[in-house]
Image: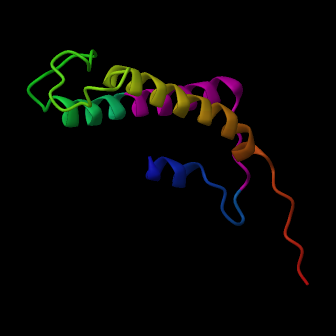
Amino acid sequence: MLFALVLVSEGRGIDTMRFGRAQTLVIVGALAAAHLVALQVNIRRYVTGTEQQGPNLDSGAEWWWTGLPFGPTTVWAVGALAFALLLVVLWPQLRRETAPALRV
């Protein structure tokens, strides 16, 4: 991801690169999907260990708080949704053109 950011970053003397709507949708979707998978793998690792597989994190949960009214699958869904919404909210700010710096 860092390499991809460097490739599309604006440098001095380089024309500004802009993404269209379809490209933006693909980039935001890919970032959201990558975060969804990474969050699921990390939560799975700490809740059941690596011997369990599957999208349902509640099944076979060995290390989870017993008094909580929600399980690890809920935490995963809320975390993934929050990250996707963050991308949607921040993407226009990242694409905004900046004013040239004033030299004093």
Report the residue at 43% width, 22% height from top: 77
Identify which residue, 19 or 57, lies in the foreground.
57
- The image quadrant that residue 84 belongs to is top right
Report the residue at 59% width, 48% height from top: 8
Q: Is residue 102 one of those drawn in magenta?
A: no
Identify which residue, 64 or 95, lies in the foreground.
64
The relative height of residue 50 versus residue 95 in the rendered view (above or below) is above
Spot occupied by residue 15 in the image (x, y as percentages of width and height): 73, 54
| In the image: residue 25, left or right of residue 71 | right
The C terminus lies in quadrant: bottom right
Q: Main secondary structure of the magenta part?
A: helix
Spot occupied by residue 73 in the image (x, y as percentages of width and height): 34, 20
Report the residue at 34% width, 26% height from top: 68
Spot occupied by residue 88 in the image (x, y as percentages of width and height): 65, 31
- The image quadrant that residue 71 belongs to is top left
- The image quadrant that residue 102 belongs to is bottom right
The relative height of residue 13 versus residue 57 in the rendered view (above or below) is below
Q: Residue extending furthest bottom?
A: 104
Spot occupied by residue 50 in the image (x, y as percentages of width and height): 12, 31
The relative height of residue 48 versus residue 46 in the rendered view (above or below) is above
Query: Which contiguous range is marked in magenta?
Result: 15-36
Identify which residue, 11 or 56, lies in the foreground.
56
The relative height of residue 6 versus residue 95 in the rendered view (above or below) is below
Q: Is residue 22 one of those drawn in magenta?
A: yes
Q: Residue extending furthest left?
A: 51
